[in-house]
Image: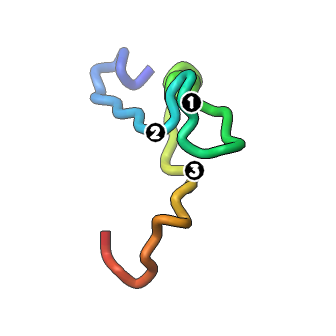
Amino acid sequence: MLGEAGATVYCTGRSVHGRPATPGRTETIEETAELVDVLVNDIWGGDALTEWGKPF
């Protein structure tokens, strides 16, 4: 709906259909793009990549 209203909409993710990025996580960016209206970083799967105390 935001895109239809003229807004620029970004949808990002790591898993795509047929290529999961994280074992045991079946959701994909394609499924999210079909379902989402507004989604703000509700899942973080990168704990193993996090260096706490350092800025991004």
Q: Quadrant of the N terminus?
A: top left
Could you say whether the residue bearing mark 3 is in a helix, strand or loop?
loop
Kindly identify which residue carries mark 1.
28
Q: Amino acid at mark 1?
A: Thr
> Mark 2 sits on what residue?
13
* Residue at horizontal 71 percent and vertical 42 percent from the top: 24
Give whichever of discs 3 and 1 has the lower sequence position: 1
Q: CA distance from mark 3 to mark 1?
A: 14 Å
Residue 32 shown left or right of residue 10 in the figure? right
Check disc 3 and give the amino acid type. Asp
Q: Identity of the amino acid at label 2? A: Gly
Question: Looking at the rendered structure, which numbered label has been put on residue 42?
Answer: 3
Q: Quadrant of residue 7?
A: top left
Instruction: Tell which residue pokes out farthest to the bottom in this image.
Output: 53
Between disc 3 and disc 2, whose residue precedes? 2
User: 9 or 22, which lies in front?
Assistant: 22
Residue 9 located left or right of residue 44: left
- Find the distance from the CA under tag 2 to the CA under tag 1: 7 Å
Task: Estimate how packed mark 3 is, as few (under 14), some (14 to 19) or many (20 or more) residues with alpha carbons within 10 Å.
Answer: few
* Mark earlier in primary sequence (2, 1): 2
Q: Position of residue 51 (x, y in %)?
A: 43, 76
Query: Which residue is most to the right?
Result: 24
For the residues labelled 2 and 1, say whether their Cβ atoms are less than 8 Å apart. yes
Q: Are marks 3 and 1 in contact (CB under 8 Å)?
A: no
